[in-house]
Image (tube, rainbow, N blue to C red):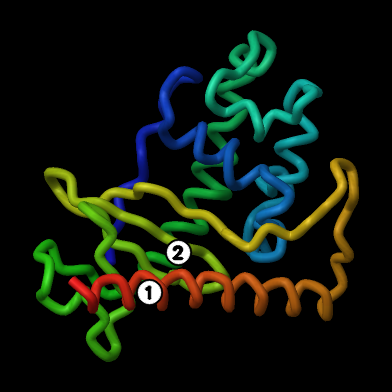
Amino acid sequence: MKIRLLPNGRPDEHLGLSHTLKHYLRPQEMWVDICDEVEPDHQPMSVAEALPNHTPPAWEQWKNPPAELRAAWAQLEPAYEHGYGALITRLADALPEPSRWVGSGDDGSPGQPWVVRDYRRACHAGEGVLLMVRWRAGGWQLYTALRPKDFKLKRHECPPADQRNVTIRRKLAELDVGKRIAAWRAEESKR
């Protein structure tokens, strides 16, 4: 499917850069585990380290960023374009396009990855990423993309990056997204 990413947006808008801050830089979502093809400068830890140091951390201040983070807002653009946005686009490219109409196959038909969520469509896009899109004039636009498995980390803890731990975290994230999609399919079938 061809997906349109959200526009970058300003610090007071919940658009592309704030989603990058909120999800991609949040260590508990472990986007680092699926960044094999992302250049090191655009990977979550590198981007987070380049932002002004905050308490609470920058990824928790996406709703109302302080002045220092607002001043550094443009630093998120490359991470969105070449990191978070690039990963979402790559995953979406492998998916079939959802139907715009409720009841036309998005409701759990065999082989259909999409489930209806109000005016959005959601699916497991792969690698433990929950992708939500909505129809906008001209095509399907990103609503959000997250890795909903909350890997419990202490604030400054670096997770083990060996292949075994990365594989385990990927599998756990995939299972978590699968459970959410299954629950939403069950809700749909009751309507």
Type of amino acid under label 2: Arg
Instruction: Quadrant for residue 101, please give it.
Output: bottom left
Type of amino acid under label 1: Ala
Residue extending furthest top? 67
Contact check, label 1 and label 2, Cβ < 8 Å: yes
Local secondary structure at mark 1: loop
User: Residue 163: which disc?
Assistant: none
Image point (89%, 42%), residue name? 156
Query: Left or right of 113: which side holds 149?
Result: right
Q: Which sits in the foreground, 84 or 180?
A: 180
Q: Position of residue 43 (x, y in %)?
A: 69, 49
User: Residue 90: which disc?
Assistant: 2
Q: Which sits in the foreground, 31 or 171?
A: 171
Above or below residue 13? Residue 113 is below
Instruction: Quadrant for residue 159, please give it.
Output: bottom right
Image point (83%, 80%), residue name? 164
The crowding category of the residue bearing disc 2, from other C-alpha atoms within 10 Å (few below 14, some 14 to 19, many at least 20), is some
Instruction: Quadrant for residue 61, please give it.
Output: top right
Above or below residue 191? Residue 11 is above
